[in-house]
Amino acid sequence: MLFRNIVIALGALFSPLAMATDVETVAVLDTELIIDNKPTPHSPDRPGEIERGRYMTEHIRKALDASDAYELVSLDAAREIVEDKASSVKYIHQCQPCVRKIGQALEVDYVATVWVQVVSNLIINFNFVLRDGETGEVVKTSFIDIRGNNNRSWRTGTNYLLKKHFNEYFDTVPEQALEDAMTVWPES
């Protein structure tokens, strides 16, 4: 009888429904751009960088959505808060109370903030911060520098940032999910 009860308890513990509670929710805010370099005749157009920021956001969201460890949560329920904070602070990623308010409104475990600092046409810095959705406290940060201000370097850099941030520390984003997420980028 004891053995039967242990088997039933283990079965309940490892059932798909019980394991689903281990999936953590995450909301990924839109990528923010910090442009340090002054435009020159040889600078890429800013709309190109803005578009790359959108691709980067979608790449990250798609990769996390494919992960078994995270459930991606849409920002729709907090869109007004996000827009209000974006209009009242220069950068949301620098505003812990802003991220906390968004996380609480969405009732997520984590809020991811992403920003890109364009130092020059050669040096681009990608930053990824995972914050606790309830408190806004930083849980994990990662950053990388890439060389080149084009779709290919941003795509490769985003994929590397995801591998570094999630696989090195959490081992949660499958390689195929990372490859599939790269499809959001144009070929050029």
Image: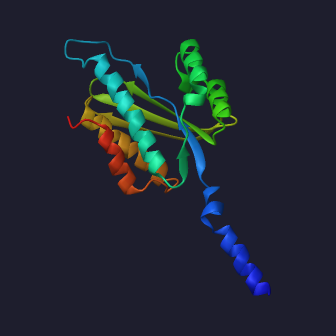
Q: Residue at x 36, y 55 (%)?
A: 176
Q: Residue at x 48, y 49 (%)?
A: 166
On the image, the x and y values in percent for residue 156 come to: 30, 42
In the foreground, 61 or 171: 61
In the foreground, 151 or 137: 151
Q: Quadrant of residue 62?
A: top left
Q: In the rendered image, which quarter contains the N terminus?
A: bottom right
Q: Residue at x 52, y 20 (%)?
A: 91
> How is colour applied across the structure in the image?
rainbow
Q: Quadrant of residue 108?
A: top right
> Is residue 73 something one can see in this rendering?
yes
On the image, the x and y values in percent for residue 15 come to: 63, 67
> Is residue 136 something one can see in this rendering?
no
* Direction right: furthest residue: 1
On the image, the x and y values in percent for residue 46 come to: 31, 17
Where 91 sits versus 135, above or below? above
The number of callouts visible is: 0
Q: Residue at x 37, y 56 (%)?
A: 175
On the image, the x and y values in percent for residue 133 come to: 64, 37
Q: In the rendered image, which quarter contains the C terminus?
A: top left
Where 168 sits versus 138, above or below? below
Horizontal relation, residue 127 to residue 111: left or right: left
Where 87 sits versus 177, above or below? above
Q: Quadrant of residue 18?
A: bottom right
Horizontal relation, residue 167 to residue 76: left or right: left
